[in-house]
Amino acid sequence: MAAPAPGSAPAGRPGGRPRLPARLAGAVLAALLLAVAAAVWWVGQSQSFVNWALARAAAASEGALQAGPARGTLLGGMRIDSLRWRDAGRDVELHGIVLAWQPAALWRRELRLTRVEVARATVRLRDAGTTATLPESLALPLAVRVDALGIGRLRLVPDGGPEIALERVGLAGRYRAGTYRIDTLSAVSPQYGEARLEGRLGDRAPFALELVGRVAARLDGGQTLPQVRVLVDGTLEDLAVAAQALPPPAPGASGTSGPATPGTPGPGASGASGSTTSGVPGPVWIGLDTRVRPFAATLAERFAPVGLTLHGVTPAQLGLADVPQARVSGTATLRIGDAGLAGRIALRNAEPGTLDREALPVGELEAEFVASARRIAFDALRVALAGGGSARGALALDLERRVTLFGRTLPALEGRLALRDVDLAQIAAGLEPTRLGGTVGIDAAAFELDLADPSRRGIAARLRARVDG
């Protein structure tokens, strides 16, 4: 075998010289990777980075964002004492914030928040002098999932409106493929009751919306009213709203241990049109239908006429005490305007009775009405009384004018009614049967009567009187 020529490269090492640039590049790359790993570790495990990031965000917002002290790390979760955002339209304050997430979800292009807690939140809305409009898109650059978001107490303070206080606000939902999905949204109001909703919202105009939920309203005394099932369908610009109050269970009915929690079926609530305890669909107890255009310029344009349907509703079921007994069915149409309400009612009472038996001696009532903060007027009024009598005419309550009758201060009542075949025995027990006809005029504390009874010859009365005190 011939010996290698002098100066030739050893076998297996082409080129003859060590590849110094390649080794140097490898060392630099390793150093960079080590530096990146150290930076990632510092970002993920250092509390300093959290405070640094909040400070940079506050500076970028030009003073709109203010952040309090923070503890924890980006990877392990963090606590922030307070956050505040102020601009021309709103002032938002958050206190006691806890945040945890799954960084690994970013590899799937998803921001996943596993836990978000806020002890207290206040949202003050200001009138910025501009008309609210919808953007063209609500799309996000990546998918988002919120496993559990909770707010202990939330205060909503509209500009010039009453404050709304909510407790135990909860949200779970996600955004993916152009749709926001609300798995659950719940809240409790100490004053008004509690509600639970679920649904979905499109991320591009016209923003298709579907919501279903349950609302359990509460009276001032703490009594919970029958649950209301709500369905919203349409777009953010034009919504169809339907609501149905679920009839309360009859006393002593089986399987009625108490009011159901919103979001869970209550007794007899399996059908869309109400149900009986046997599961057979029944008529709607209280129903509401309307359309809402939230961004319209006036109230009349925002709300289409509201249709109400009643079937066998009693005052006791609505928590009304010291009210004459009745069982009311019928319909009502409400038109909402900037000046107040207007509409028509047509009601029937299945259980008329005398006043001394704490009942209402009225079988049917029809009227057109106009209501404002100053006056409530009933025109084209027709009342069918127990025993076959009737009254027709017009009545109005002047809410700004007060009168004292028999020691009680009441809004002034004015109007005129034409009576026909009124049987006093059907109004109060112990009175003689009659067939009174004529007119009755009322003007605050002044009364004018012109009545006669054709069933009793010679019985007629004309009276003008005034009650003072």
Image (cartoon, rainbow, N blue to C red):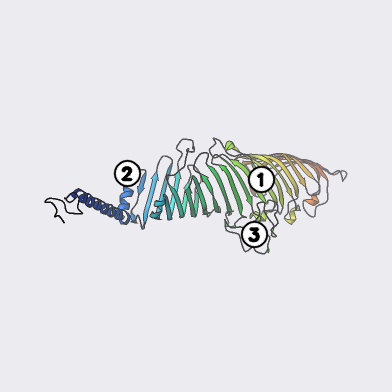
Q: Which residue has dot 3 on it?
A: 267
Real-space Cα separation, disc 1 to disc 2, in angstroms: 53 Å
- Residue kind at label 3, given as amino acid type: Pro
Task: Give the mark nearer the N terminus: 3 vs 2.
Answer: 2
Within 10 Å of disc 1 (Cα), the crowding (few <14, some 14-19, many 20+) is some
Q: Position of residue 230 (x, y in %)?
A: 60, 49
Whether residue 137 appears in this view of the structure is yes
Q: Which numbered disc covers residue 263?
A: none
Q: Which numbered disc covers residue 59?
A: 2
Within 10 Å of disc 2 (Cα), the crowding (few <14, some 14-19, many 20+) is few
| Badge 3 element | loop
Real-space Cα separation, disc 3 to disc 1, in angstroms: 23 Å
Q: Which residue has dot 1 on it?
A: 308
Q: In the rendered view, does 461 fall on the left or right side of 59? A: right
Image vertical order of residue 251 relative to residue 21, above or below: below
Image vertical order of residue 38 relative to residue 437, above or below: below
Real-space Cα separation, disc 3 to disc 2, in angstroms: 55 Å
Q: Position of residue 316 (x, y in %)?
A: 67, 56
Which of discs 1 and 2 lies nearer the camera? The answer is: 2
Please name the residue shown 56% across and 46% down the image: 210
Kindly indicate whether the residue at mark 2 contacts the one at mark 1 (C-beta within 8 angstroms): no
- Residue kind at label 1, given as amino acid type: Leu
